[in-house]
Every structure is written in C-alpha cells, then in structure tokens.
Amino acid sequence: MDGTSSTVSSKNDSALRDGTAPIAFFDSGVGGLPYLRWAKEHLPQENYVYLLDRAHFPYGIKTREEVFQAVSEGIARLIEKVRPKIIVLACNTATVVALQRLRTLHPDIPFVGVVPAVKPAAERTHGKRIGVMATNRTLQDVYLENLIKQFASHCEVVRVAGPGIVEFVEQRLFQSSPEEKYGVVKEAIEVLKARKVDEVVLGCTHFLYLEEELRLGLGQDIELIDSRDGVGRQLMRVLSTKSVPNTQPKKGDLLYVTGSSPIEERYYTFARMFGLEVAGIL
C-alpha cells in the first residue's frame, strides 16, 4: 500500500471512531432529502452532510458505467472533504449500480443503500400484482431483476418509468400548480390502475415529493411503499454496530452541491425545508 492510500485509510479509520463525524447522504439531486429527514427525526443528535451531485444530474438516463463514474467521483470528494463515519447512497439508481463496488473501493466506511421495496410489496399484495415506479436505469438493471426473482417471483410486476418526474421535481416543484403536479404523474397512474396492481413501489427517491398526487390518483385500494423506514432502520443498525454515535454538542447539518456554476435559489429553498445550511460547492 502506498503512502497516499495509507493516509486516506487512516483518516477514514479516525472518522469511524469519532462520534462527531457526520453521517453523509449522497444523491444526484434532492430526492434523498426525505430520507435525510427520517434520519434527523430519529437520530437528532447526529451531524449530517448532504451532497447533491448537480453536475451529473440526472442519473436515470445514463449508462451503468456513466452512473458509476459520477457516483464514485462524488463519493471520493465527499470522503476527502468531510470524512463521514457512514455514507447513505440516498438514490436507487446509484445504489443498484454502484453500492457493491463502492464498498470494495472504500472498505473502511460503512455504506447504506436505498433499493426498491420489492420485498414488502410482494408480501403485502393480495392480487399478486405490484407496480414498480423507477428511473429507466433502475428498471433495466439486473439488480432489480434479481430482487424480483428473489422476492416477487409469484407476482406480476408492472414496471413504470414515469418520464419527466425526476426533472420536474428538481427544477419546477416550487412554481407548479396542483394541476401541474398531478399532470406529471397522471400517465403512470393510468398505467398502474389499468394493470390492476394493489401495491406500488416508489423506486426513485424523487417520486416521494409527489406522493400526495400519486395517492390521490391511485385511490385507497392501491398502497404506496417506499424504503424510508427500512433504510432508516439499517442506518441505525450500522451506527450501533460499525460506528460511534455522537454524544457531543451538535455541529449543524450542511448541504453541498457539485458543479461550477452559482448555486440556484431552489437549492436554498430545499435546504431550508429540510433544516440544512448550504455550505457551498464541492
């Protein structure tokens, strides 16, 4: 091992033993913020950093290798800047493409991923028909195919890409009317209802911002399922078994973005919504 690798490993080891080191969340955009909110509510004493990979947004239309390169670059910057004790890949696409390779690249840091909640949907369905809403990249990935084979082989699985939803949430959420918000999910709702599913997996973190519109359109007979509770419980397990909880005064929770252009006002709005301070460009 060369001197540089030894130094990085030593820094990571120190972070794992330092309870005040932050828990870091990473996503291509704002989709992972509801997952961060869950963590802040259940682990309020911890320090948090959120890195929003604006420079490579969106991930869902990229190839596997393009996604991996973007994610690995962002994670390397995150580690160098804040030395997190745990990293949450708060993005389904990033998780299905990059999680295992990142664990190999950074064995000193525990990673928690977000994967589509296929298992609970398959356990709850009565009609054995479930829907999975996700990005094209996630829907096409072998990771999702393996989840379905492992947990939902007895079900018909309807895959819906929801084109334009991620970009809408990222760029137009705050200036849109209720009618416009419903309009962006209307096509997905019609497909899912026509196929008579009774469980719908939100397999992209951005879709949570339109949860109300989806529930309104799908009706009471179709249940929406996301991964927030499962990911949050896994984060708590990792914190208690592979890291050190924070017992010192809280330092504050920060949001960074990638890219070189000035930070858009909407990101300050998202930061305020989730109790974060915009710390700058990473």
Image (tube, grey):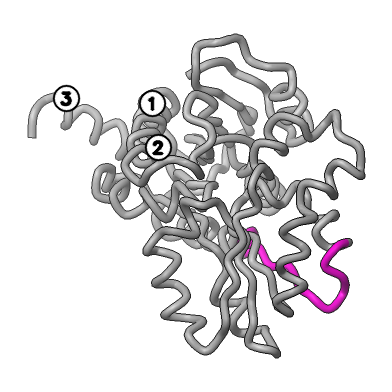
Q: Quadrant of residue 213?
A: bottom right
Residue 103 vertical position relative to residue 217 in the rendered view, above or below: above
In this rendered view, identify the residue nearer to me: 71 or 47: 71
Assess whether residue 221 is covered by the magenta stretch.
yes
Give the alpha-carbon distance from disc 1 to disc 2, as whole Å: 10 Å
Q: Identify the secondary structure beneath mark 3.
A: helix
User: Residue visible at 49% across and 40% down?
Assistant: 59
Range of residues picked out in magenta: 217-229
Q: Is residue 183 visible?
A: yes
How many badges with numbers are in the image?
A: 3
Q: Amino acid at mark 1?
A: Arg
Residue that mark 3 sits on: 4
Percent position (x, y) of residue 187? 75, 56
User: Residue visible at 45% across and 47% down?
Assistant: 94
User: Residue visible at 83% across and 47% down?
Assistant: 183
Farthest residue in the right direction?
A: 178
Residue that mark 2 sits on: 71
Label located before the other in sequence (1 or 3): 3
Q: Amino acid at mark 3?
A: Thr
Residue that mark 1 sits on: 77
Please tell me how crowded label 2 is: few (under 14), some (14-19), or many (20+) other residues with Cα within 10 Å. Answer: many
Please tell me how crowded label 3 is: few (under 14), some (14-19), or many (20+) other residues with Cα within 10 Å. Answer: few
In this rendered view, identify the residue nearer to me: 230 or 263: 263
Q: Identify the secondary structure beneath mark 2.
A: helix
Q: Quadrant of the N terminus?
A: top left
